[in-house]
Image (spheres, rainbow, N blue to C red):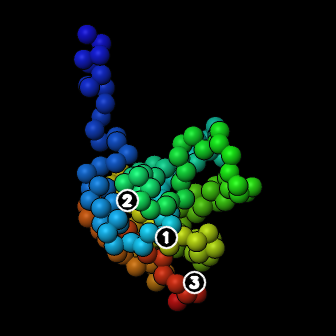
Amino acid sequence: YGSTRVVDAVESGAAYVQPEDLAAAAWVSEHVPEDALFMANTFRFDFLPDFVIASDAGGWLPVLAGRATIVPPMIYPVERTAEPDFNKRLVALAEIAPDMASPAAIELLRNAGITHVFIGQRGGRIDPASLLASPDYALEYHAANTYVFRLLDGKVGD
């Protein structure tokens, strides 16, 4: 009896990847260069502040669209990295999410090699309205609550 009730315990709206995200990922796969690097929505736990995970479908872009994202798989703390400051850089990027149009955030993103921003259907700390209002971003895709922005080259605010 118990196994037949498991279906009722899963809320479809809680899935990281929604149908709208699949359409956006297909668009990314066809229209965004293969060497792109995406900023995605992240989440940090109060009890483990150095542990950063994806909070929407942006974390699944390597699988869904074949494009890199700043968010590693959830098991990354038990793996080794060739970059000694990897986690420090990841935490710094996660911290700027609420204010990604600020000059400091733009500089950090550019220095990290980030070329695009993916905001999934579930949303998160990245505010699409602030990116839409910023001269440093270009909206490349939008459907429902899913967005793809390109970080423009140049000086901050140009």
Drawn side of residue 102 relative to residue 20, left or right: right
Which amino acid type is shown beneath numbered disc 3?
Val
Residue 65: assigned label: 2
**Which one is earlier in the sequence, the residue at label 3 or at label 2?**
2
**Which one is earlier in the sequence, the residue at label 2 or at label 1?**
1
Q: In the rendered image, which residue does mark 1 sit on? A: 35
Which x, y percent locates residue 81? 68, 51
Distance between the alpha carbons at the discs numbered 3 and 1: 22 Å
Q: In the rendered image, which residue does mark 3 sit on? A: 156
Q: In this view, does 76 lie above or below 5?
A: below
Q: In this view, does 47 lie above or below 136?
A: above
Return the residue nearer the eye: 100 or 60: 60
Assign a secondary structure to mark 1. Answer: loop
The residue positioned 31% from the left and 30% from the top of the image is: 10
Q: Which of marks 3 and 2 is in front?
A: 2
* Callout 2–callout 1 Cβ contact below 8 Å: no
Distance between the alpha carbons at the discs numbered 2 and 1: 12 Å
Which amino acid type is shown beneath numbered disc 2?
Ala
Q: Nearer the viewer, mark 3 or mark 1?
A: 1
